[in-house]
Amino acid sequence: MKVKKRMAKKLVTIRKDATVSAAINLMKKHSIRHLPVVEQGELHGWVTERDIREAYLASIIEQVSMGDIMIKDPITISPDANLEEAAELLYRHGIGGLPVVDKGKLVGVITVADIMAAFIEVMGILQESSRIDVILGGKPHAFENVSKIIRDHGSEIISVGMSAHQDRTKRVYYLRLTKCDVHSMAKEIEETGYKVLSMTE
C-alpha cells in the first residue's frame, strides 16, 4: 500500500513567523501533534508538540517564532513510497509523523495513527471474523490444501500472519477468516495432517 492512500491530505500548516501561542491554538483546535511549517506550498520545517512545550516558557519572556524552534531539515517521505517504509522511518527515528513531500511541495502528512489504522483494516481486526492458528510443517502445497478446506467450509481468508521461526516446519500461520464454524474446520485440518494450535469464533 502506498503512503498517498493513507496520508492526511487536508493539512493544517503554519508560517515561520507564527508565534508559539498560535501553534498551540492550532494544535488544540485540530487535535494534532505536528505542524508543517510551510511558505508558498513548500515545506520549510516541522514542529512537534514536544518542540512547542520546550519553547513555551521562553516564549513568555521573549518573542519566539516557528522559524526559531522548527526542525529545519525534517525526515520526509514520498507519496509513492510503501507504507512499510514510512513505518520503518517512524520506528527507527522514534517519531510520530512524517511530512509527505513531492517535488519540494508538501502534499500530505502520515502519522503512526494512520499506519495503525491501515494495519487494522488490512488485518480485518474490526470486522466480525474467526481465527485459526496452524502449523503447516513445511509440507508441499500445505497452504493451498488448508485454504481449500477453509473455502469448502464456506469461509475466506481475510489476512495471514506468520511467526518468524527460522525452522519452516515450526512456523505458525495466523489465519483470520470470515465468520465460520471454526471447530469443524479445525477438525478437518488436523485430520489432513496439520497441527491446529488455537482458534476463536
Image (tube, rainbow, N blue to C red):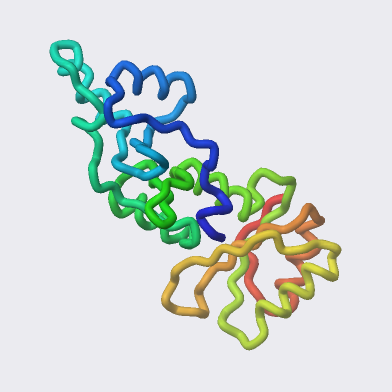
Establish if 188 lies above or below 89.
below
Establish if 138 lies above or below 17.
below
Q: Quadrant of residue 17?
A: top left
Q: Quadrant of residue 57?
A: top left
Q: Position of residue 130 (x, y in %)?
A: 72, 53
Give the side of residue 2 with respect to residue 55, left or right. Answer: right
Q: Residue furthest front?
A: 40
Q: How many marks?
A: 0
Q: Position of residue 26 (x, y in %)?
A: 42, 22
Q: For this rendering, which residue is in front, 99 or 42? A: 42
- What residue sits 18% from the left and 17% below the top? 63
Give the side of residue 6 with respect to residue 41, left or right. Answer: right
Q: For this rendering, which residue is in front, 198 or 34? A: 34
- What residue sits 78% from the left and 65% below the top? 185
- What residue sits 30% from the left and 34% below the top? 47
Q: Position of residue 119 (x, y in %)?
A: 55, 51
- What residue sits 43% from the left and 50% below the top? 100
Q: For this rendering, which residue is in front, 33 or 121? A: 33
Q: Residue furthest bottom?
A: 140
Which image quarter is the N terminus in? Answer: bottom right
Q: For this rendering, which residue is in front, 70 or 51? A: 70
